[in-house]
Image: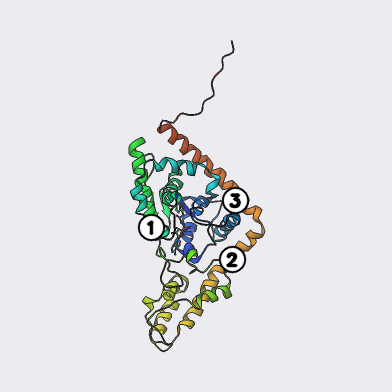
């Protein structure tokens, strides 16, 4: 069975973009892959964050993943910082990663532009990500499009380490993206992202979803209700394709082009369909939130299973790199 690894930051609640771009694919892959899913809290601290919320957000993300269909019976679900080998291998990888490669990462450039003083953790972010995946020698990484560049770098890191220390030791993992690889936010412009405030949360109820959708940007050329629209230029239409049945999608397109429906009519239907899709997830997440011990147990069990693999890889890495193992001196009593 091929091994799959993916991660998500506990930097806010699970949103529609994460769900369609990555998590829904994780759920599918559990059927026929050996899956590891990780809540990457060490990545989340590379940007400003609220210290007193990190813990609850981590637990909350775990509850959301389980509610979305991640099954701890078939996948290993754990928290990155519970396995110190992630940061250990990341350090090792910094010694084979050219700084120039890190500086040209799009996400780094975007985030660095918004900061007065750029910290080394932000630059090294993709090195830790490489360690996450390669520690488990995963073959496939289901992610959204924004992570593909990081996976290309990860492949290069694996190659460089292998050339220096042991040919074929680390695999070169492949990204697995879906047709929802880049969900645009409700501003109709940027990638849907918590930090931009252009999301629909997976926990939002139907009223909450409607409040988010109502002001969402549609086809910019459709100014008046009576103007015919161009569905292919409308982000709401592209969301319909992920949430509505094919005949509804066709009807939306026709009624938009002929101005038989206004944008609000179209959003109402989308809102109902999003709410229907997310309602069972929301209910399960609420149940889990009321029973945090259940989630903590899953994470404990996940860490135990992840640790066994991580320690084994790290021991081999240390050995291949010539690091001295800790040994007890044998005392010979005379
Ligand atoms: P994060 O937490 O930003 O996002 C989690 C996953 O959701 C995807 N995603 C999207 N997909 C489509 N459209 C969107 N608008 C959208 N927004 C987010 C992301 O591509 C991602 O797959 N660096 C990673 C976390 C990470 C990781 C890893 C991933 C750390 N280590 C190892 C894979 C393997 C990140 O920031 O994800």
Q: Residue at x 40, y 33 (%)?
A: 321
Relative image position of residue 137 (x, y in whole percent): 43, 44
Label 3 element class: helix
Q: Give the mark nearest the N terminus, 3 or 2.
A: 2
Q: Are marks 3 and 2 in contact (CB under 8 Å)?
A: no
Count residues near mark 2 (Cα–Cα under 10 Å), then give few for <14, some for 14-19, many for 20+: many
- Residue beneath disc 1: 109
Give the mark nearest the N terminus, 1 or 3: 1
- Nearer the observer, 71 or 195: 195
Q: Quadrant of the C terminus?
A: top right
Label for residue 37?
A: none
Percent from the top left, x then y, of residue 129? 44, 49
Quadrant in the rendering for residue 145: bottom left
Instruction: Answer yes or no: disc 2 within 8 Å of ligand 1.
Output: no
Tag 1's secondary structure?
A: helix
Mark 1 to mark 3: distance in Å? 36 Å
Give the residue number, with chain letter if any, for mark 2. 282
At a point 50% along the width and 38% down the height, the residue shown is 311
Give the CA separation, mark 1 to mark 2: 35 Å
Q: 186 or 288, which lies in front? A: 186
The extreme front residue here reads 116
Name which quarter of the figure residue 111 lies in. Answer: bottom left
Label 3: few (<14), some (14–19) or many (≥20) C-alpha neighbours in 10 Å: many
Q: Nearer the viewer, mark 1 or mark 2?
A: 1
**Residue 190 visible at all:** yes
Identify whether 197 is placed above or below 66. Answer: below
Q: Which quadrant does ligand 1 occupy?
A: bottom left
Q: Position of residue 216 (x, y in %)?
A: 47, 76
Of badges 1 and 3, the one in the foreground is 1
Question: How many marks are shown on the rendered structure?
Answer: 3
Q: Which mark is residue 298?
A: 3
């Amino acid at each position: 069975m091929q091994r799959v690894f993916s991660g998500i930051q506990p930097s806010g609640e699970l949103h529609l973009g994460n769900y369609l771009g990555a998590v829904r694919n994780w759920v599918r892959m559990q059927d026929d892959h050996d899956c590891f899913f990780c809540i990457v809290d060490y990545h989340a601290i590379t940007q400003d964050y609220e210290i007193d919320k990190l813990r609850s957000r981590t637990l909350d993300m775990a509850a959301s993943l389980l509610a979305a269909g991640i099954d701890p019976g078939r996948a290993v679900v754990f928290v990155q910082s519970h396995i110190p080998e992630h940061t250990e291998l990341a350090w090792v990888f910094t010694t084979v990663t050219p700084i120039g490669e890190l500086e040209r990462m799009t996400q780094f450039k975007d985030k660095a532009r918004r900061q007065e003083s750029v910290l080394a953790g932000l630059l090294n972010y993709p090195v830790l990500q490489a360690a996450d995946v390669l520690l488990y020698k995963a073959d496939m990484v289901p992610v959204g499009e924004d992570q593909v560049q990081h996976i290309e770098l990860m492949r290069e890191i694996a190659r460089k380490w292998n050339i220096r220390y042991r040919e074929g030791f680390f695999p070169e993992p492949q990204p697995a993206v879906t047709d929802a690889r880049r969900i645009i936010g409700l501003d109709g412009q940027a990638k849907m992202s918590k930090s931009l405030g252009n999301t629909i949360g997976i926990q939002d109820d139907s009223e909450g979803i409607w409040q988010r959708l109502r002001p969402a940007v549609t086809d910019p050329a459709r100014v008046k209700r009576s103007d015919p629209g161009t569905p292919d230029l409308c982000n709401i239409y592209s969301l319909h394709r992920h949430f509505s049945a094919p005949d509804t999608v066709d009807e939306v397109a026709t009624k938009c082009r002929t101005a038989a429906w206004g944008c609000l009519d179209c959003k109402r239907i989308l809102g109902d369909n999003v709410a229907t899709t997310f309602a069972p997830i929301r209910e399960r997440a609420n149940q889990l939130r009321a029973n945090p011990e259940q989630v903590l147990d899953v994470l404990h069990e996940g860490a135990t299973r992840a640790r066994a693999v991580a320690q084994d890889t790290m021991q081999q890495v240390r050995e291949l790199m010539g690091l001295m193992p800790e040994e007890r001196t044998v005392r010979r009593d005379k």
